[in-house]
Every structure is written in C-alpha cells, then in structure tokens.
Amino acid sequence: MRITSVDERDSSWERHQPRFRVYFFAGGDAPPASWSTDTYDVTGADVLEVVQWAQEHAGSEWLYAVALVDEEHTPPAGRCRGLTWLVGTDANASREDADEQRRFAAMLDRRGKRVVDLG
C-alpha cells in the first residue's frame, strides 16, 4: 500500500450514482484452469453495501470481485466503458506483477469470510 497526501481540490468532476460491476468466479483453483464467471451490475448502493451483497451471494464456494464502471466520452466513437478494480481482480486475467498476484491471493483468502457486516 502506498499513501500520498494530496490537495482535495484537484478533481474536476464527481458522480453520485456509481455503477458497480460484481464478478463471481467458480472452479479453476489450480492453474491453468479457467474460472467460470457470473457478472452483475449494481446501482443504488455504496461500495460497502455492494461488497456485503457480493460476499453473501458468493458464500463459501465462489470468489468475488468488485469494480467501478465508468464511461469516457471519446469522439468519434461516443462512449468507451472501463473498470477500476475496487476489491479483487479478474480471476481469469494473467497476474503479471506483485500487486496483481497479491490481489488474487487476497481473493482466495477471502473466500467464505465476511469482510463487511453492516449489521
């Protein structure tokens, strides 16, 4: 983890209706096996509510990951959708650096555990 002090006035926009994408992965524990994936978009919630829903839905069998969905307006194509990973990562992606390997290992370690409980 790297922490840097910043000036909070450096942003030029904000959104109040985030769209989260939740991935559930089943199978494929041992490489090179692939994971089957179920994917959902979630709106009308904050990140803690989304993580709580994901961990409850995943149970003890599945891995889960949460990303923030964003769209860039790029002329002439119009819109280009992208993801920012918030919790975990794509289980089927190659893990080429230490951060990606650590995020995937944390996903495996979180399986079946509650990390958010809004009680």
Image: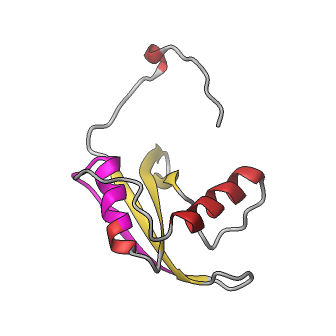
Between residue 66 and residue 103, name the one nearer to us. Answer: 103
* Quadrant housing the N terminus: top right
Between residue 11 and residue 35, name the one nearer to us. Answer: 35
Residue 81 location in percent, x, y?
46, 55
Residue 66 location in percent, x, y?
45, 58
Answer whether residue 46 is magenta in the image: yes
Which residue is at a point 36% across and 53% down the rendered structure image? 116
Which residue is at a point 35% across and 31% down the rendered structure image? 14
- The stretch of residues the image draws in magenta is 36-55
Answer whether residue 51 is magenta in the image: yes
Between residue 98 and residue 70, name the one nearer to us. Answer: 98
Describe residue 77's horizontal placement relative to residue 43 as left or right: right
Which residue is at a point 26% across and 55% down the rendered structure image? 43
Residue 97 location in percent, x, y?
77, 54
Can see residue 90?
Answer: no
Q: Is residue 94 above or below residue 12?
A: below
Between residue 112 and residue 65, name the one nearer to us. Answer: 112
Describe residue 87's horizontal placement relative to residue 52 as left or right: right
Which residue is at a point 54% across and 17% down the rendered structure image? 6
Describe residue 42's horizontal placement relative to residue 58 as left or right: left
